[in-house]
Image (cartoon, grey):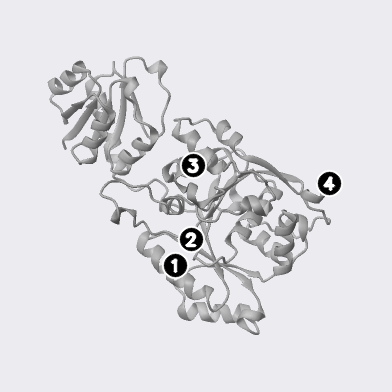
Amino acid sequence: MSISVVVLGDQEKIVRQIESYRGEMMVTRVCSDIAEAIAACNTGMADVLLVSDAQLVPPMEQIDELLMHQTAVVLFFERPENWQPLPDVLHLPATVAMVELEERISSTVQSLTRPAAGATGEKLELDDVSTGCNGKIVSFWSAPGSPGRSTVALNYAVEAAQAGLDVVLLDADTYAASIAIQLGLMEESASIAQLCRVIDSGSVDVARLNAACSMVQVGEANMRVATGIPRASRWPEVRASALRRASMLLREHHDIVVLDLAPYIELDEQLSFDTQAPQRNAVTVEMLQCSDELFMIVRADSVGIPRALRAIDELEEALPGLKSKIVFNRVGTGSTGRSPKRRLIEAWDRFGPTREIAGYLPDDSASCNASVLGGSPLLEIAPRCSLRTEIRSLAGIKSTDSPKNQTSRRFRAKA
Protein backbone atom coordinates (compact mmCIF):
# COMPACT_ATOMS: atom_id res chain seq x y z
CA MET A 1 0.00 0.00 0.00
CA SER A 2 1.46 3.33 -1.06
CA ILE A 3 1.13 6.34 1.26
CA SER A 4 0.98 9.73 -0.41
CA VAL A 5 2.54 12.52 1.65
CA VAL A 6 2.17 16.29 1.40
CA VAL A 7 5.09 18.01 3.17
CA LEU A 8 4.38 21.40 4.74
CA GLY A 9 7.59 23.35 5.23
CA ASP A 10 10.75 24.04 3.28
CA GLN A 11 12.71 20.99 4.45
CA GLU A 12 14.50 19.41 1.50
CA LYS A 13 16.35 17.03 3.84
CA ILE A 14 13.12 15.31 4.87
CA VAL A 15 11.93 14.99 1.27
CA ARG A 16 15.26 13.44 0.25
CA GLN A 17 15.09 11.00 3.17
CA ILE A 18 11.63 9.81 2.21
CA GLU A 19 12.46 9.47 -1.48
CA SER A 20 15.79 7.70 -0.90
CA TYR A 21 14.21 5.23 1.52
CA ARG A 22 12.12 3.77 -1.34
CA GLY A 23 9.41 2.45 0.95
CA GLU A 24 5.63 2.85 0.81
CA MET A 25 5.72 6.62 1.41
CA MET A 26 5.70 8.89 -1.61
CA VAL A 27 5.96 12.69 -1.53
CA THR A 28 3.32 14.13 -3.85
CA ARG A 29 3.76 17.80 -3.03
CA VAL A 30 5.89 20.20 -0.99
CA CYS A 31 4.12 23.34 0.26
CA SER A 32 5.41 26.42 2.05
CA ASP A 33 1.96 27.79 2.93
CA ILE A 34 -0.71 26.31 5.21
CA ALA A 35 -3.60 27.18 2.90
CA GLU A 36 -1.83 25.56 -0.06
CA ALA A 37 -1.16 22.37 1.90
CA ILE A 38 -4.73 22.15 3.19
CA ALA A 39 -6.10 22.68 -0.31
CA ALA A 40 -3.81 19.96 -1.67
CA CYS A 41 -4.96 17.51 1.00
CA ASN A 42 -8.64 18.34 0.41
CA THR A 43 -8.30 17.35 -3.24
CA GLY A 44 -7.68 13.79 -2.09
CA MET A 45 -4.07 13.64 -3.23
CA ALA A 46 -2.65 12.98 0.23
CA ASP A 47 -2.98 10.35 2.93
CA VAL A 48 -0.69 12.30 5.25
CA LEU A 49 0.14 15.93 5.92
CA LEU A 50 3.68 15.98 7.32
CA VAL A 51 4.44 19.31 9.01
CA SER A 52 8.20 19.91 9.17
CA ASP A 53 8.15 23.52 10.41
CA ALA A 54 6.89 24.39 13.90
CA GLN A 55 5.77 27.80 12.63
CA LEU A 56 3.39 26.22 10.11
CA VAL A 57 1.26 24.01 12.34
CA PRO A 58 -2.38 24.39 11.16
CA PRO A 59 -5.03 25.47 13.69
CA MET A 60 -7.19 22.78 15.26
CA GLU A 61 -10.14 23.68 13.02
CA GLN A 62 -8.15 22.74 9.92
CA ILE A 63 -6.61 19.68 11.58
CA ASP A 64 -10.10 18.41 12.39
CA GLU A 65 -11.15 19.01 8.79
CA LEU A 66 -8.21 16.92 7.56
CA LEU A 67 -8.98 14.12 10.01
CA MET A 68 -12.60 14.15 8.90
CA HIS A 69 -11.37 13.50 5.36
CA GLN A 70 -9.16 10.67 6.72
CA THR A 71 -5.91 12.56 6.19
CA ALA A 72 -3.42 11.91 8.99
CA VAL A 73 -1.45 14.82 10.44
CA VAL A 74 2.16 14.30 11.53
CA LEU A 75 4.37 16.84 13.30
CA PHE A 76 8.00 16.11 12.41
CA PHE A 77 10.29 18.63 14.18
CA GLU A 78 13.93 18.88 15.22
CA ARG A 79 13.23 19.86 18.87
CA PRO A 80 10.52 17.61 20.31
CA GLU A 81 10.93 19.07 23.80
CA ASN A 82 9.38 22.34 22.58
CA TRP A 83 6.21 20.75 21.19
CA GLN A 84 2.75 21.35 22.54
CA PRO A 85 0.91 18.02 22.21
CA LEU A 86 -2.16 18.20 19.98
CA PRO A 87 -4.99 15.64 20.18
CA ASP A 88 -5.21 13.04 17.38
CA VAL A 89 -1.93 14.28 15.89
CA LEU A 90 1.13 12.05 15.54
CA HIS A 91 4.26 13.66 17.04
CA LEU A 92 7.62 12.28 15.91
CA PRO A 93 11.18 13.65 16.28
CA ALA A 94 13.10 14.37 13.10
CA THR A 95 15.80 11.95 14.32
CA VAL A 96 13.50 8.92 14.10
CA ALA A 97 14.59 6.15 11.74
CA MET A 98 12.75 6.02 8.42
CA VAL A 99 11.55 2.48 9.01
CA GLU A 100 9.89 3.56 12.28
CA LEU A 101 8.52 6.72 10.64
CA GLU A 102 6.87 4.68 7.90
CA GLU A 103 5.50 2.14 10.37
CA ARG A 104 3.99 4.79 12.65
CA ILE A 105 2.49 6.74 9.76
CA SER A 106 1.05 3.60 8.18
CA SER A 107 -0.57 2.61 11.47
CA THR A 108 -2.04 6.10 11.90
CA VAL A 109 -3.47 6.15 8.37
CA GLN A 110 -5.10 2.76 8.86
CA SER A 111 -6.61 3.80 12.20
CA LEU A 112 -8.46 6.68 10.50
CA THR A 113 -10.39 4.25 8.31
CA ARG A 114 -11.51 2.00 11.19
CA PRO A 115 -14.69 2.51 13.21
CA ALA A 116 -14.24 4.59 16.33
CA ALA A 117 -13.14 2.56 19.32
CA GLY A 118 -16.00 1.72 21.57
CA ALA A 119 -18.65 2.58 18.96
CA THR A 120 -20.19 -0.86 19.30
CA GLY A 121 -19.03 -1.61 22.82
CA GLU A 122 -21.19 -2.08 25.83
CA LYS A 123 -22.48 1.00 27.58
CA LEU A 124 -21.55 1.82 31.13
CA GLU A 125 -24.25 1.82 33.76
CA LEU A 126 -24.50 4.75 36.14
CA ASP A 127 -24.23 2.43 39.11
CA ASP A 128 -20.89 1.15 37.79
CA VAL A 129 -19.28 4.59 37.58
CA SER A 130 -17.04 5.41 40.51
CA THR A 131 -14.92 8.41 41.35
CA GLY A 132 -11.40 8.29 39.94
CA CYS A 133 -12.11 6.18 36.87
CA ASN A 134 -13.28 7.08 33.39
CA GLY A 135 -16.88 8.21 33.39
CA LYS A 136 -19.46 8.29 30.66
CA ILE A 137 -21.33 10.71 28.43
CA VAL A 138 -25.12 10.73 28.81
CA SER A 139 -27.05 12.68 26.16
CA PHE A 140 -30.64 13.85 26.13
CA TRP A 141 -32.21 14.29 22.69
CA SER A 142 -35.72 14.60 21.32
CA ALA A 143 -37.85 15.39 18.32
CA PRO A 144 -38.70 19.09 17.80
CA GLY A 145 -41.53 20.47 19.89
CA SER A 146 -40.33 21.13 23.47
CA PRO A 147 -41.11 17.76 25.09
CA GLY A 148 -39.24 18.75 28.28
CA ARG A 149 -35.77 17.55 27.31
CA SER A 150 -33.83 20.29 29.10
CA THR A 151 -35.85 19.89 32.30
CA VAL A 152 -35.15 16.15 32.40
CA ALA A 153 -31.44 16.60 31.54
CA LEU A 154 -30.96 19.21 34.26
CA ASN A 155 -32.67 17.23 36.99
CA TYR A 156 -30.94 14.01 35.92
CA ALA A 157 -27.59 15.77 36.38
CA VAL A 158 -28.70 17.19 39.73
CA GLU A 159 -29.75 13.78 41.03
CA ALA A 160 -26.47 12.21 39.90
CA ALA A 161 -24.54 14.95 41.71
CA GLN A 162 -26.69 14.51 44.82
CA ALA A 163 -25.86 10.79 44.74
CA GLY A 164 -22.17 11.63 45.10
CA LEU A 165 -21.02 11.56 41.47
CA ASP A 166 -18.74 14.18 39.95
CA VAL A 167 -21.03 15.69 37.30
CA VAL A 168 -20.55 18.12 34.41
CA LEU A 169 -23.68 19.43 32.65
CA LEU A 170 -23.21 20.85 29.13
CA ASP A 171 -25.94 22.88 27.42
CA ALA A 172 -25.18 21.98 23.80
CA ASP A 173 -28.49 23.16 22.34
CA THR A 174 -27.45 25.54 19.55
CA TYR A 175 -31.04 26.66 18.92
CA ALA A 176 -32.61 27.40 22.31
CA ALA A 177 -30.25 26.98 25.25
CA SER A 178 -32.14 27.10 28.55
CA ILE A 179 -30.09 25.48 31.32
CA ALA A 180 -28.77 28.84 32.57
CA ILE A 181 -32.32 30.17 32.77
CA GLN A 182 -33.56 27.13 34.66
CA LEU A 183 -30.73 27.48 37.18
CA GLY A 184 -31.15 31.24 37.54
CA LEU A 185 -27.64 31.94 36.23
CA MET A 186 -27.56 35.54 35.01
CA GLU A 187 -24.54 35.44 32.72
CA GLU A 188 -23.90 35.70 29.00
CA SER A 189 -20.45 34.15 28.82
CA ALA A 190 -21.56 30.96 27.01
CA SER A 191 -19.29 28.48 28.76
CA ILE A 192 -19.88 25.95 25.99
CA ALA A 193 -18.14 28.30 23.52
CA GLN A 194 -15.28 28.80 25.99
CA LEU A 195 -14.74 25.04 26.11
CA CYS A 196 -14.40 24.99 22.33
CA ARG A 197 -11.93 27.87 22.39
CA VAL A 198 -9.77 26.05 24.93
CA ILE A 199 -9.66 22.98 22.70
CA ASP A 200 -9.02 25.04 19.56
CA SER A 201 -5.98 26.55 21.27
CA GLY A 202 -4.50 23.05 21.28
CA SER A 203 -4.79 22.62 25.04
CA VAL A 204 -5.54 19.26 26.64
CA ASP A 205 -5.53 20.65 30.18
CA VAL A 206 -8.74 19.61 31.92
CA ALA A 207 -8.17 22.32 34.54
CA ARG A 208 -8.80 24.96 31.87
CA LEU A 209 -12.02 23.23 30.87
CA ASN A 210 -13.15 23.05 34.49
CA ALA A 211 -12.37 26.74 34.95
CA ALA A 212 -14.60 27.61 32.00
CA CYS A 213 -17.58 25.96 33.70
CA SER A 214 -19.65 27.45 36.50
CA MET A 215 -19.65 25.61 39.82
CA VAL A 216 -23.28 25.38 40.96
CA GLN A 217 -24.48 24.17 44.35
CA VAL A 218 -27.58 21.99 44.22
CA GLY A 219 -28.86 20.77 47.54
CA GLU A 220 -25.89 19.39 49.45
CA ALA A 221 -23.78 18.79 46.34
CA ASN A 222 -21.93 20.74 43.66
CA MET A 223 -21.77 20.21 39.92
CA ARG A 224 -20.11 21.97 37.01
CA VAL A 225 -22.31 23.61 34.39
CA ALA A 226 -21.28 24.82 30.94
CA THR A 227 -23.98 27.28 29.94
CA GLY A 228 -25.20 27.45 26.35
CA ILE A 229 -25.05 30.28 23.85
CA PRO A 230 -27.46 33.07 24.87
CA ARG A 231 -28.32 33.92 21.25
CA ALA A 232 -28.92 31.42 18.47
CA SER A 233 -26.86 33.54 16.06
CA ARG A 234 -23.73 32.57 17.98
CA TRP A 235 -23.94 28.91 16.94
CA PRO A 236 -20.69 29.01 14.85
CA GLU A 237 -18.77 29.48 18.13
CA VAL A 238 -19.67 25.92 19.15
CA ARG A 239 -17.61 23.77 16.83
CA ALA A 240 -18.64 20.12 16.74
CA SER A 241 -15.26 18.40 16.84
CA ALA A 242 -13.96 20.80 19.50
CA LEU A 243 -16.95 20.09 21.74
CA ARG A 244 -16.48 16.36 21.18
CA ARG A 245 -12.83 16.61 22.28
CA ALA A 246 -13.82 18.66 25.32
CA SER A 247 -16.52 16.16 26.31
CA MET A 248 -14.18 13.20 25.92
CA LEU A 249 -11.52 14.94 28.01
CA LEU A 250 -14.04 15.82 30.70
CA ARG A 251 -15.26 12.23 30.71
CA GLU A 252 -11.76 11.05 31.57
CA HIS A 253 -11.69 13.19 34.72
CA HIS A 254 -15.32 13.20 35.89
CA ASP A 255 -17.87 10.51 36.63
CA ILE A 256 -20.55 11.66 34.23
CA VAL A 257 -20.95 14.29 31.51
CA VAL A 258 -24.60 15.16 30.80
CA LEU A 259 -25.49 16.86 27.50
CA ASP A 260 -28.66 18.67 26.51
CA LEU A 261 -28.80 18.50 22.69
CA ALA A 262 -30.81 20.29 20.04
CA PRO A 263 -33.38 18.16 18.17
CA TYR A 264 -32.18 18.74 14.61
CA ILE A 265 -29.76 16.33 12.91
CA GLU A 266 -29.98 17.32 9.22
CA LEU A 267 -26.61 18.17 7.66
CA ASP A 268 -27.68 19.97 4.51
CA GLU A 269 -25.18 22.85 4.43
CA GLN A 270 -23.12 21.01 1.82
CA LEU A 271 -26.03 21.48 -0.60
CA SER A 272 -25.55 25.25 -0.46
CA PHE A 273 -21.76 25.50 -0.55
CA ASP A 274 -19.10 24.23 -2.95
CA THR A 275 -16.56 23.99 -0.12
CA GLN A 276 -16.58 22.70 3.44
CA ALA A 277 -19.04 24.90 5.35
CA PRO A 278 -19.90 25.22 9.04
CA GLN A 279 -22.78 22.96 9.98
CA ARG A 280 -25.14 24.11 12.68
CA ASN A 281 -26.53 20.66 13.41
CA ALA A 282 -23.11 19.00 13.43
CA VAL A 283 -22.87 19.50 17.21
CA THR A 284 -25.92 17.31 17.80
CA VAL A 285 -24.78 14.64 15.33
CA GLU A 286 -21.23 14.55 16.71
CA MET A 287 -22.35 14.29 20.33
CA LEU A 288 -24.95 11.63 19.55
CA GLN A 289 -22.18 9.52 18.03
CA CYS A 290 -19.87 9.76 21.04
CA SER A 291 -22.57 9.24 23.69
CA ASP A 292 -22.27 6.25 25.99
CA GLU A 293 -25.97 6.46 26.84
CA LEU A 294 -28.69 8.24 24.88
CA PHE A 295 -32.14 9.11 26.20
CA MET A 296 -34.81 10.24 23.76
CA ILE A 297 -37.47 12.33 25.48
CA VAL A 298 -40.93 11.79 23.98
CA ARG A 299 -43.90 13.93 24.86
CA ALA A 300 -46.68 11.48 25.73
CA ASP A 301 -49.53 12.82 23.62
CA SER A 302 -51.01 12.51 20.15
CA VAL A 303 -48.60 15.12 18.75
CA GLY A 304 -45.40 14.15 20.51
CA ILE A 305 -45.47 10.43 19.67
CA PRO A 306 -45.82 10.83 15.85
CA ARG A 307 -43.05 13.42 15.94
CA ALA A 308 -40.86 11.00 17.85
CA LEU A 309 -41.50 8.20 15.37
CA ARG A 310 -40.46 10.41 12.46
CA ALA A 311 -37.39 11.58 14.37
CA ILE A 312 -36.34 7.99 15.06
CA ASP A 313 -36.59 7.18 11.36
CA GLU A 314 -34.39 10.18 10.55
CA LEU A 315 -31.93 9.16 13.25
CA GLU A 316 -31.65 5.62 11.88
CA GLU A 317 -31.09 6.97 8.39
CA ALA A 318 -28.47 9.51 9.46
CA LEU A 319 -26.74 7.43 12.16
CA PRO A 320 -27.49 3.75 11.60
CA GLY A 321 -26.88 1.49 14.57
CA LEU A 322 -27.26 4.23 17.17
CA LYS A 323 -29.48 3.00 20.00
CA SER A 324 -31.60 5.27 22.15
CA LYS A 325 -33.70 4.70 25.27
CA ILE A 326 -37.22 6.09 25.16
CA VAL A 327 -38.45 8.24 28.04
CA PHE A 328 -42.11 9.27 27.91
CA ASN A 329 -42.59 12.66 29.52
CA ARG A 330 -45.70 14.49 30.72
CA VAL A 331 -47.60 11.25 31.16
CA GLY A 332 -51.12 11.91 32.42
CA THR A 333 -54.79 11.23 31.94
CA GLY A 334 -55.34 14.60 30.28
CA SER A 335 -53.48 13.58 27.12
CA THR A 336 -53.97 9.81 26.97
CA GLY A 337 -57.12 9.08 29.00
CA ARG A 338 -57.44 6.52 31.76
CA SER A 339 -54.51 4.17 32.46
CA PRO A 340 -52.01 6.35 30.57
CA LYS A 341 -49.03 4.01 31.02
CA ARG A 342 -50.92 1.01 29.61
CA ARG A 343 -52.19 3.06 26.66
CA LEU A 344 -48.68 4.29 25.89
CA ILE A 345 -47.33 0.75 25.93
CA GLU A 346 -50.08 -0.41 23.59
CA ALA A 347 -49.52 2.49 21.19
CA TRP A 348 -45.76 2.04 21.18
CA ASP A 349 -46.00 -1.71 20.63
CA ARG A 350 -48.28 -1.06 17.66
CA PHE A 351 -46.56 1.89 15.97
CA GLY A 352 -43.20 2.33 17.61
CA PRO A 353 -39.88 0.81 16.58
CA THR A 354 -37.96 -1.64 18.73
CA ARG A 355 -36.59 0.69 21.37
CA GLU A 356 -36.19 0.18 25.09
CA ILE A 357 -38.62 2.23 27.16
CA ALA A 358 -36.56 3.52 30.07
CA GLY A 359 -39.17 5.48 31.98
CA TYR A 360 -42.52 7.23 32.29
CA LEU A 361 -42.33 10.72 33.76
CA PRO A 362 -45.59 12.10 35.14
CA ASP A 363 -47.10 15.40 34.07
CA ASP A 364 -46.30 17.76 36.93
CA SER A 365 -46.66 21.25 35.47
CA ALA A 366 -47.01 22.89 38.89
CA SER A 367 -43.62 21.65 40.11
CA CYS A 368 -41.91 22.42 36.78
CA ASN A 369 -43.32 25.96 36.68
CA ALA A 370 -42.25 26.58 40.26
CA SER A 371 -38.80 25.24 39.44
CA VAL A 372 -38.31 27.64 36.52
CA LEU A 373 -39.76 30.56 38.50
CA GLY A 374 -37.40 29.87 41.39
CA GLY A 375 -34.38 29.22 39.18
CA SER A 376 -33.77 25.94 41.00
CA PRO A 377 -34.10 22.21 40.24
CA LEU A 378 -36.85 19.98 41.58
CA LEU A 379 -34.53 18.85 44.38
CA GLU A 380 -34.83 22.28 45.97
CA ILE A 381 -38.35 23.27 44.91
CA ALA A 382 -40.36 20.06 45.16
CA PRO A 383 -38.15 17.34 46.68
CA ARG A 384 -41.03 14.90 47.26
CA CYS A 385 -42.82 15.27 43.92
CA SER A 386 -43.43 12.17 41.82
CA LEU A 387 -41.58 13.63 38.82
CA ARG A 388 -38.38 13.90 40.81
CA THR A 389 -38.82 10.34 42.06
CA GLU A 390 -39.07 9.01 38.50
CA ILE A 391 -36.03 11.00 37.35
CA ARG A 392 -34.05 9.56 40.25
CA SER A 393 -35.07 6.11 39.07
CA LEU A 394 -34.04 7.02 35.52
CA ALA A 395 -30.61 7.97 36.84
CA GLY A 396 -30.27 4.59 38.53
CA ILE A 397 -30.49 6.00 42.05
CA LYS A 398 -32.22 3.34 44.09
CA SER A 399 -32.40 5.18 47.41
CA THR A 400 -35.93 6.23 48.36
CA ASP A 401 -34.86 8.66 51.06
CA SER A 402 -36.23 12.15 50.48
CA PRO A 403 -34.31 15.14 51.75
CA LYS A 404 -35.94 17.71 53.95
CA ASN A 405 -37.67 20.64 52.30
CA GLN A 406 -35.20 23.26 51.15
CA THR A 407 -35.70 26.72 49.79
CA SER A 408 -34.19 27.50 46.43
CA ARG A 409 -30.73 28.98 46.12
CA ARG A 410 -32.22 32.25 44.93
CA PHE A 411 -34.37 32.77 48.01
CA ARG A 412 -31.79 31.26 50.37
CA ALA A 413 -29.29 33.89 49.23
CA LYS A 414 -31.70 36.64 50.26
CA ALA A 415 -32.26 35.24 53.72
Q: Which mark is residue 263?
A: 2
Q: Residues within 10 Å of mark 1 (few under 14, many from 20)?
A: some
Q: In the shown orientation, is residue 153 left or right of residue 80? A: right
Of callouts 2 and 3, the N-terminal one: 3
Q: CA distance from mark 4 to mark 1?
A: 44 Å
Q: Nearer the viewer, mark 3 or mark 4?
A: 4
Of all residues, the one furthest to the bottom in this rendering is 338
**Closest to the observer, 208 or 254:** 208
- Amino acid bearing label 2: Pro
Quickly name the residue at label 4. Answer: 414
Q: Nearer the viewer, mark 4 or mark 2?
A: 4
- Count of numbered labels shown in the rendering: 4
Q: CA distance from mark 2 to mark 3?
A: 21 Å
Quickly name the residue at label 3. Answer: 248
**Res 81 → quadrant:** top left
Residue 387 shows in the view: yes
Image coordinates of residue 119 in percent, x first then y, are: 41, 51
Quickly name the residue at label 1. Answer: 311
- Amino acid bearing label 4: Lys
Question: Cβ–Cβ below 8 Å for labels 4 and 2?
Answer: no
- Amino acid bearing label 1: Ala
Q: CA distance from mark 1 to mark 2?
A: 9 Å
Of callouts 4 and 2, the N-terminal one: 2
**Closest to the observer, 140 or 366:** 366
Of callouts 1 and 2, the N-terminal one: 2
